[in-house]
């Protein structure tokens, strides 16, 4: 294990920002090989730029030595906090855990593998200059197949034009939030965490920051995962599918009523009525098709209502570890004085 001594801690270059408390949240999962180097690099940037900062690392059920590697940094790096979740909940719940724990004036969510952490001061400055939040976007859609890109384009068009969802396109997971924006986001107590939907809904000033992710791009999780996420976003952000099938059901009911009137008239004015097997089969097929479409959409919304009504926690924090090194600004202490 390599530890920084006092002589190895990077010297301050110029005046540091002493008025803004910056929190950086990063989710870790099975990254033991290089996590220490990445956290040190992040810490050096924040130490150089800010008097008051904290790094909140969320271990999302790692099975390797990730937790041991980051815990080894606690004695020599101030303003470092580690949250360990009870199991692997996924990136979105892990980010929610970090946001819930962060106490900074500006909170930045980064991916240590792909996001340019040296640009954190720029994102913080954008938040401090009036922007409620800044969201990273990747217009080039790095690492996605042609099918996924076409599917994403169709999905965004449908979500905006038909469902009326005001959504940020091509988000990467890099987010910078002012304290008012974070407070509003945390008040949206829903199981699903979709900042690209929730942040426009909040209504505070919102900016996008385009960049190309670098480093180790996460493995593509496939078409079915993208489809499942798209359905989750639409069900979370809009009643449009339910409204569509409601109107379709009304239309189908009217057609069925007209058909019943037609059957009665035929029975009254026709002396010989041929067996209507084709017509009956067509009508039954159409009605059952509509019935199962309605049941499918209702099932999605009933499932969402059931999930929300259960009040199950989105995440469970098993342990929290904090730096033992004294922070520079005692009046704005953000860690305790003992590690465990």
Image (tube, rainbow, N blue to C red):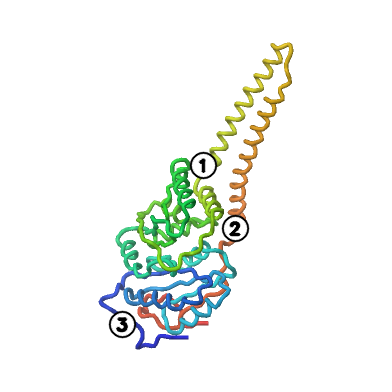
**Residue annotated with mark 2:** 311
Q: Residue at x 39, y 51 (%)?
A: 203
Badge 1: residue crowd in 10 Å (few <14, some 14–19, many ≥20): some
Relative to residue 278, is residue 63 drawn left or right?
A: left
Residue 214: name its quadrant. Answer: bottom left
Which one is closest to the eye, mark 2 or mark 1? 1
Q: Is residue 303 above or below residue 182?
A: above
Which residue is under mark 3?
Answer: 11
**Front-lying residue, 63 or 242:** 63
* Rendering coords of residue 246 (x, y %): 57, 36
Q: Residue at x 33, y 58 (%)?
A: 131
* Residue 25 visible to an observer of this rendering: no
Q: Are marks 3 and 1 in contact (CB under 8 Å)?
A: no
Q: Position of residue 78 (x, y in %)?
A: 41, 80
Question: Which tag, 3 or 2, sits closer to the chain's start?
Answer: 3
Q: CA distance from mark 3 to mark 2?
A: 48 Å
- Report, in whole angstroms, how far the alpha carbon at label 2 lies from the one at label 1: 25 Å
- Residue 204 — which label? none
């Amino acid at each position: 294990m390599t530890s920084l001594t006092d002589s190895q801690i990077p010297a301050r270059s110029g005046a540091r920002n002493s008025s803004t408390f910056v929190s950086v949240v990063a989710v870790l999962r099975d990254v033991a090989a290089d996590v220490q180097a990445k956290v040190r690099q992040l810490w050096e940037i924040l130490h150089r730029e800010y008097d008051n900062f904290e790094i909140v690392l969320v271990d999302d059920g790692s099975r390797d030595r990730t937790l041991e590697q980051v815990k080894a940094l606690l004695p020599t790096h101030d303003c470092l906090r580690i949250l360990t979740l009870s199991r692997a909940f996924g990136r979105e719940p892990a980010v929610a855990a970090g946001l819930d724990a962060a106490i900074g004036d500006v909170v930045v969510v980064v991916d240590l593998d792909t996001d340019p952490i040296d640009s954190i001061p720029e994102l913080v400055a954008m938040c401090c200059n009036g922007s409620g939040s800044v969201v990273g976007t990747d217009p080039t859609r790095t690492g996605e197949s042609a099918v996924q890109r076409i599917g994403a384009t169709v999905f965004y068009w449908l979500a905006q034009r038909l469902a009326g969802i005001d959504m940020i396109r091509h988000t990467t997971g890099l987010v910078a939030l002012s304290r008012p924006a974070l407070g509003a986001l945390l008040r949206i107590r829903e199981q699903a965490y979709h900042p690209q939907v929730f942040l426009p809904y909040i209504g505070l000033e919102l900016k996008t920051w385009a960049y190309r992710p670098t480093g180790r791009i996460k493995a593509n999780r496939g078409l079915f995962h993208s489809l499942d996420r798209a359905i989750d976003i639409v069900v979370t952000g809009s009643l449009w599918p339910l409204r569509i099938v409601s109107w379709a059901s009304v239309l189908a009911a009217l057609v069925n009523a007209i058909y019943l009137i037609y059957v009665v008239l035929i029975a009254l004015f026709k002396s010989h009525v041929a067996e209507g097997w084709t017509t009956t089969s067509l009508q039954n097929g159409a009605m059952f098709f509509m019935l199962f479409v309605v049941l499918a959409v209702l099932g999605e919304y009933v499932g969402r209502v059931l999930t929300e009504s259960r009040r199950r926690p989105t995440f469970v924090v098993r342990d929290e570890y904090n730096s033992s090194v004294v922070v520079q600004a005692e009046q704005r202490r953000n860690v305790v004085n003992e590690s465990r």
